[in-house]
Image (cartoon, helix red, strand yellow):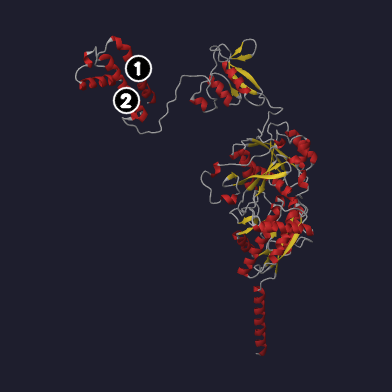
Amino acid sequence: MKKLVILLLFISIWVIVSGFVCCQRPAVVNIGAIFTFDSVIGKAAKPAMEAALSDVNNDSRIRTKLKLLMGDVNSSVFLGTIDAFQLVEKEVVAIIGPQVSGIAHMISSIANGLQVPLISYAATDPTLSALQFPFFVRTTQSDSYQMAAMADLVDFFRWKEVIVVGVDDDYGRNGIAALEEELNKKMAKISYKLMLCNPLDESEVMDKLNKSKLLGSRVYVVHVNPDPKLTIFTVAQKLQMMTDTYTWLVTDWLSATLDSFPPTKKTSLGFLQGVVGLRQHTPESSQKRAFMSRWKRMQQKGSASSELNTYGLQAYDTVWLVAYAIDRLLDEHKNITFSPNSKILHVNISGLQIEKLKVFTGGNDLLDIVLQTNFTGLSGQIQFNQDRNVFSGGYDVLNIDGVSIRTVGYWSNAAGFSLSPPEARKGKQDINCCRDQRLHNITWPGGKSKTPRGWVIAVDERPLRIGVPYRASFTDFVTEVPGSHKIKGYCIDVFVKALELVPYHVPYMFHPFGNGRSNPKYDALVKMVAADVFDAAVGDIAIVTNRTKIVDFSQPYASTGLVIVAPILNSKSSAWVFLKPFSTEMWCVTAASFVVIAVVIWVLEHRVNDHFRGPPRRQLVTMFLFSFSTLFKTNSEEYLTSITYIGLFFQSSVSVIKGYLIRWH
């Protein structure tokens, strides 16, 4: 009996201790970070995350301390995969990063299998979707938004073709695909793609840029990884492609690069003059200004080796996002547990110890909390949409003018381009907001302020094929001079004069259509333009309905005698519509003319015409009746031949009034 009591007491103590241990809040929670330390983004992200970790662990509101385990992948998918396995083996509950989209694709699959949320502050590839990678969350803006801004920028300046320079990896290919889709919506297109290896090779860049000079388009959109050497523009300057005939648009890689430069290095950016780029917009705040001052002190102490860029701000906010989510998870569930993965328990691979990889049982709960988190950080509002991307805060439009980087406007998905930042326009947007698209004056390459045309006639461009009717009659319009292959006529003269107004050379060749013995069929000529046999046609071609459905016509330059009958705006009519032209002044002039006519006729006829004599009342009635009757040319009174011409003069005045009424009606 005594042994049974001791056994029950031991079991009770074990249950209590086990329950206490299971419910005990852990003192430290491991989180991981995977990125490239020695990169433009990594040099800003590493000290930013370390500063955020220090702030979190010193904040009394966060009751659980975080331990940040960092892994340097050196932009390698292979090393990134190894680091990811090493981190999950140490039971991290979340992974911050990576910054490279290709690595993010691989690690996202690992995160899905082990249910560890992967939160990236720099992977912008639009194909990293929540549907394919449910544990992937992004605290930066997707390139789908950035390419919408870039397409709007191209459309803002009315360019229709661009040449894209990009890196041949997931980041480059998928970003360019998103740009192509957005340009199609604006009736524009990518005429040529210059895909480069990563990292950039100067000889390859020079070869491909040099070949692109033979093309017609002069608008370049550059979408590469942040490059401290600025290889693209260094080569472009050597090839004399930074002149006023070229236009360079860049995605936010350039702003991230330039923001990381020390002030002394920014003074040597003259060769970038005229470049227009985008930067992820971060609202100004006292919190951001305080951190910028703190960053200066970190640089003085040696804990930060570069200037702060947008991705550094987002890395700082990402650590706080994870801290808030873990703290709330522990408040609700009290503990963090891992369980063996049933799918790999029986996998026996020598030396790899795959069985040590465990599933984070609270991964789904932590992910849900992350997606519900809403707070204001250094980079702005941190809140996620249904695609698990942070809500777009818009972009700054930058212009490099000499050695200065100017903000010439802002872009947001809701309002387009404006001179005020997106946060200043909240609550003020209306139906017409997107019609008011404005940017400050931009300095283009070569120091020009006039917007570049964006294209030239390519070196190997074929001349325009102009079809002209070879007429047998009415040859003054257009025909071929027999025996000389020369085209002449009024239509040709108009075409040549119009080309003189074009500020660039347009090569063309006339192609006669017909045999010269009979007039050609113009319907067939128009159909050949629609079928791309001819690029255009010049001649006395009538504009009729069936032809306008397949080709576009210029404005007519020869009078046809035709008129256009169109309905009036007011569909309601009445019998008194003829009175509408009569304003107050018109009524007064008409009445005055009747009085003048009556008085003049009476003065001339009173002494010699019996019809204008008698009592005053009769004379007045006769006077005004005669004057009024001239409007209808049915005078009942006779007047003498000596005043016939005077009467006709006044009668013609009334006819003018009648003619005005008829024309108005």
Element type at mark 1 = helix
Tell which circle, 1 or 2, labels the residue nearer the N-terminal end. Answer: 2
Residue furthest toward the bottom?
Answer: 2
Residue 652's tag is 1
Which residue lies under the disc numbered 2? 591
What's the mark number on residue 347?
Answer: none
User: Which amino acid, by three-letter code, is at mark 1?
Assistant: Ser
Q: Secondary structure at mark 2?
A: helix
Give the label, 1 or 2, closer to the camera.
Answer: 2
The answer to which of 210 and 440 lies nearer the viewer is 440
Q: Tell me the amino acid under the disc marked 2.
A: Ala
Please state the horizontal and vertical placement of residue 246, each as a whole percent of the image: 70, 35
Quarter that holds the C terminus? top left
Whether residue 111 is visible here, answered yes or no, is no
| Front-most of residues 108 and 511 | 511
For disc 1, the neighbor class at 10 Å (few under 14, some 14 to 19, many from 20) is: some
Seen at 60% across and 45% down, the residue is 419
Q: Residue at x 63, y 55 (%)?
A: 380
Q: Is 241 placed above or below 72 here? A: above
Indicate the quadrant containing the N terminus: top left, top right, bottom left or bottom right.
Answer: bottom right
Residue lying farthest to the left in this orientation: 615
Task: Specify whether residue 7 is in view.
Answer: yes
Q: Determine crowd level at label 2: few under 14, some 14-19, many 20+ residues with C-alpha closer than 10 A.
A: few
Label 1 and label 2: CA atoms lie apart by 16 Å
Q: Quadrant of residue 320?
A: bottom right
Identify whether 600 is placed above or below 57.
above
Q: Quadrant of residue 93?
A: bottom right
